[in-house]
Amino acid sequence: MADMAPATPSNEARRNQMLRAAAELICERGFGETRIADVAKRARASSALVIYYFGTRDRLLVDALRYSEQNFYDAAEKMLTEVESARDRLSLLIRWTCVPENDGDVPGAWGLWFDLWAQAFRHPEVKQDREELDARWRAMIVSIVKAGQAGGEVGSVNPRAFAVTFSALLDGLSIQVALDDSEVDPESAYKIAMDYAVRELGLRKPRRKRVAS
Amino acid sequence: MADMAPATPSNEARRNQMLRAAAELICERGFGETRIADVAKRARASSALVIYYFGTRDRLLVDALRYSEQNFYDAAEKMLTEVESARDRLSLLIRWTCVPENDGDVPGAWGLWFDLWAQAFRHPEVKQDREELDARWRAMIVSIVKAGQAGGEVGSVNPRAFAVTFSALLDGLSIQVALDDSEVDPESAYKIAMDYAVRELGLRKPRRKRVAS
DNA sequence: CGTGTTTGACTGACTGTTCAATCTAATCGG
DNA sequence: CCGATTAGATTGAACAGTCAGTCAAACACG
């Protein structure tokens, strides 16, 4: 019940250390099997300190899920700024979700999705959080499509409708990949998603970049 | 560690009773929060008896997941025999996964998927099981498509490829519905999936039934 | 010193599992 | 038909281990 230490700039390093450790462990062992003692050990702290920061095991774990997914999206968004065409952006997005690369400092969000979903299914607070996250994800797709349309690269589709369907498809494919289904390896998942996007959006070559006009 | 009582015809009733109780509880509280004492109570038995049958909590819970999903597919397969056209069959399938109806005696597999996935992600035994289940699901889709092609209702597509993509789409949509995302209610999920199938398969009116020829 | 960290030691509750004992319903021998 | 025998079903009570959360004391450090 002890109220947790408020998040101050000075804490933040330690906090994140713990959050990352927790996320890693959840990913490895699962939400239900993640003990605070383990988190503490991995974060080189005592169990008591972890409680001191998060007050309760549940808050720690849920925060860790949030933290990890957030980073996942942050990284994705940042990554998108580094290419121009809608095609490249979508390609990146697909690879990001369907192909195991986990180069980020954050533990690959792979297993975390499952636990996030499982938690969201029963705890309203988490549910709402997840929904916001997903909305953000769809917003990314929408903005890619709109930019593509503005640039003449993408035909006339309803961006929102496309985003809903496309993100559902990506979720489904990433599940198979994460559980390494023998019929849906990363490459074919990528191909499926890319083909769908190309066909659905009527992707053409983008107009020459502004610089050249 | 005590080896569990073997499954005999005489046990079966009790066994199933426990499995169902376990499945229900997993669905409500989640895998990690399901105590065998609760399962025992709901199945009107003692904790000791549950162990007597399943040997260990993990086996009980995993078996319960299996049991439930299996029933889910059994029911789906049976249901398919009751309509003729590919369109109707697909419609049924979509409704079955995306629209909450849980009329079956088995607890709606909704929340169970998440836990099944989470377990499969870390335990190879479960992983393999899940893969078989999914293969079965895709096989259903494939057979629907092939039958539809034979009946002239479905154009020329690769049934397997369609099945992979379509099932991924369904998974993704059902997640949103299960977590009742505000942007993907059951009806729109149904529409999305159905539209996709219609377009992808080039669904036409089926040939008149054999009887009339 | 005083405030915010950090910890080791502790505990109290929970829960999976064991076990010895009972109960039940067949099976069998005569 | 009946008493003995047995195998399986069932349980209450005890056991043993685990683990989240508490607490008072030490620590760092401006």
Image (cartoon, coloured by chain):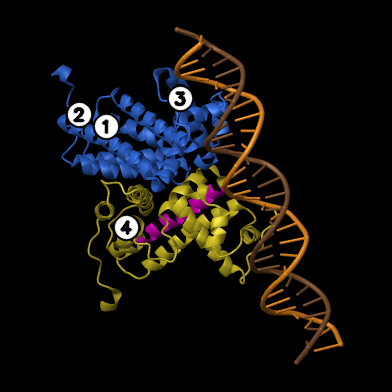
Chain colours: A blue, B yellow, C orange, D brown
Q: Between B13 and A166, which is closer to the camera in this rendering?
A: B13
> Closer to us: mark 4 or mark 2?
4
Image spot of residue B47 (x, y percent): 61, 58
Residue that label 3 marks: A15
Q: Residue at x 28, y 23 (%)?
A: A81
Same subunit: marks 4 and 3: no
- What's the distance in space between the residues labelled 2 and 3, CA to CA? 44 Å
Residue at far left of view: A213
> Is any atom of residue A194 visible in this view?
no
Q: Secondary structure beneath disc 3?
A: helix
Could you tell me the amino acid type at mark 1?
A: Arg
- Give the image quarter of residue A197: top left
Residue that label 2 marks: A206
- Relative to B206, B118 lies left or right: right
* Start-end of magenta stretch: B125-144
Could you tell me the amino acid type at mark 3?
A: Arg
Q: Please name the predominant secondary structure of the magenta segment in the image.
A: helix
Residue that label 4 marks: B99
Could you tell me the amino acid type at mark 2?
A: Pro
Kindly identify which chain the residue marked by label 2 belongs to.
Answer: A
- What's the distance in space between the residues labelled 1 and 4, CA to CA? 33 Å
Image spot of residue A59 (x, y percent): 45, 36
- Relative to A114, C20 lies left or right: right
Residue that label 1 marks: A87
